[in-house]
Image (spheres, helix red, strand yellow):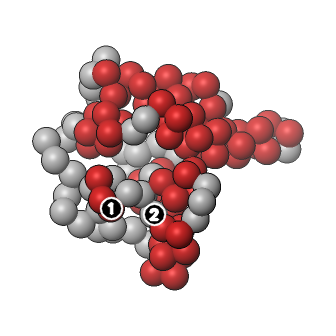
Amino acid sequence: MTISSNPYRGFRFPREVIEHALREDNPAIRLVFAGDPARGIPPCAACHGPGDHKLGAPQLKTQQPAYIERQLAAFAQGFRQNDINEQMRTIAAQLTPDEMRVVAEFYGAGAAVAQMAGQ
């Protein structure tokens, strides 16, 4: 399976946000908001938020970082296979362990905020 030739299909952030994220030094911001077009990786936020999310794709902002990192590794290794079109397996297999960690920490920061707010 290959990712769409247009990794931004359905992505709703303004082009300026994407362009800024592509120049960002922080790999989490880059992957979440711009993805990695060179590797055909769409932005995480296109499906998982923050903000909006696609039907069937969970919002990640309330998940714990360790959980997200484990799930990315499980997709990458093929242990988790509940993505009907293999999109998460394809994407996760291209991420480095450090990239998985920083994306998990980015989304997990939302979980910490929600926990402190009693949500």
Verify CB contact (< 8 Å) between mark 2 and mark 1: yes
Where 81 falls versus 96 (above or below)?
above
Q: Which mark is residue 37?
A: 1
Quadrant, the C terminus: top right
Query: Residue shown at 39%/68% (left/top)?
Result: 11
Left or right: where does residue 88 sit relative to residue 23? left
Residue under label 2, please give it. Answer: 34
Quadrant, the N terminus: top left
Q: Amino acid at mark 2?
A: Ala
Figure quadrant of residue 118: top right
Which sits in the foreground, 38 or 111? 38
Query: Residue shown at 63%/46% (left/top)?
Result: 106
Q: Position of residue 9 (x, y in %)?
A: 29, 68
Q: CA distance from mark 2 to mark 1?
A: 8 Å
Query: Residue shown at 38%/22% (left/top)?
Result: 74
Give the class, few, some or many, for how many residues have Cα within 10 Å of label 1's Cα (few <14, many ≥20). some
Where 79 falls versus 37 (above or below)?
above
Figure quadrant of residue 8: bottom left
Q: Position of residue 34 (x, y in %)?
A: 45, 63
Can the viewer see residue 60? Answer: no
Which sits in the foreground, 110 or 35? 35
Q: Position of residue 117 (x, y in %)?
A: 85, 44
Numbered disc 1: secondary structure:
helix
Give the class, few, some or many, for how many residues have Cα within 10 Å of label 2's Cα (few <14, many ≥20). many
Query: Residue shown at 55%/74% (left/top)?
Result: 20
Numbered disc 2: secondary structure:
loop
Q: Residue furthest top?
A: 79
Where 10 falls versus 86 (above or below)?
below
Q: Amino acid at mark 1?
A: Pro
Q: Which mark is residue 65?
A: none
Figure quadrant of residue 60: top right
Left or right: where does residue 102 sit relative to residue 15? right
